[in-house]
Amino acid sequence: MSYTRLYRRTGDGTLEFREAWYDDEAAQFVVNHGTVGHQSKTQETDDVGADAGEALLAAFEAQCAEDGYSPVPDDQLWRVVAQFALKTAEGTERDRHLERQAVQALSAHLAWRGLGTVEGSSIGAGKLNVFATCVDAGKAVTAVKTCLREATSDFTKLSIAVAPATDPENFKLKHAPAGVRGFSL
């Protein structure tokens, strides 16, 4: 699958995104666009061959460049971690199910809003961590809370922390259960 996602800031400071991908298995070219943090709009073209798909992707990238869209620089990205406190140090089968559920839900929720991508997850030291790279820390925290409140049964154990991508270990706690004051991986 070939894929690209690009961003631009409007005159009033609003961050917009456009993304496109060619899925060779489905023979489909998809364009998705919108305002970062809001549900996007999608247009699909079916029965697209590989050569045509790559040509459409190149034309999409050229049009985006002409319209002022570009990748977000690394110094403007954020590392966001959704963390669940677990009852055991290494987790249980229920915790692994929660991990799969949270990763799947967050991957879709963040992507369809142009906020970012889930980069991975881990279970250990009594914690489940889901790692994402996002373009807007505040909107990402709100989106993570909304998504995981709806998608999981363990929302009351959720903490969310953010760090600049250029200083990925300097996390600041942005959401936590009552009584939780610190954050560590």
Image: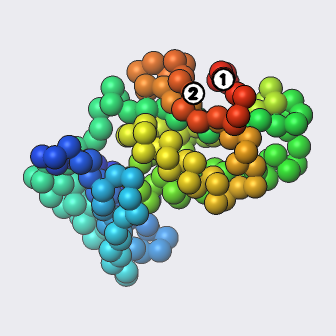
Q: Nearer the viewer, mark 2 or mark 1?
A: 1
**Quarter occupied by the C terminus:** top right
Residue at label 2?
Answer: 173
Please name the amino acid that badge 2 sits on.
Leu
Q: Is residue 160 above or below residue 98?
A: above
What residue is shown at x 32% (from left), y 74% (from top)? 43
x then y, percent, for residue 182:
65, 21
Q: Which picture quadrant has residue 118?
A: top right
Residue found at x 40% / y 63%: 39
| Left or right, 74 with reference to 182 | left
Q: In the picture shown, does residue 153 fall above or below 141?
A: below
- Viewer can see residue 2: no
Density class for disc 1 (Cα within 10 Å; few <14, some 14-19, many ≥20) is few
Towards the viewer: 133 or 172: 172
List x then y, in percent, for residue 165.
43, 26
Asked whether disc 2 touches disc 1, contact meaning CB atoms under 8 Å apart, the reply is yes
Distance (Cα) linking label 2 and label 1: 8 Å
What residue is shown at x 52% (from left), y 18% (from top)? 170
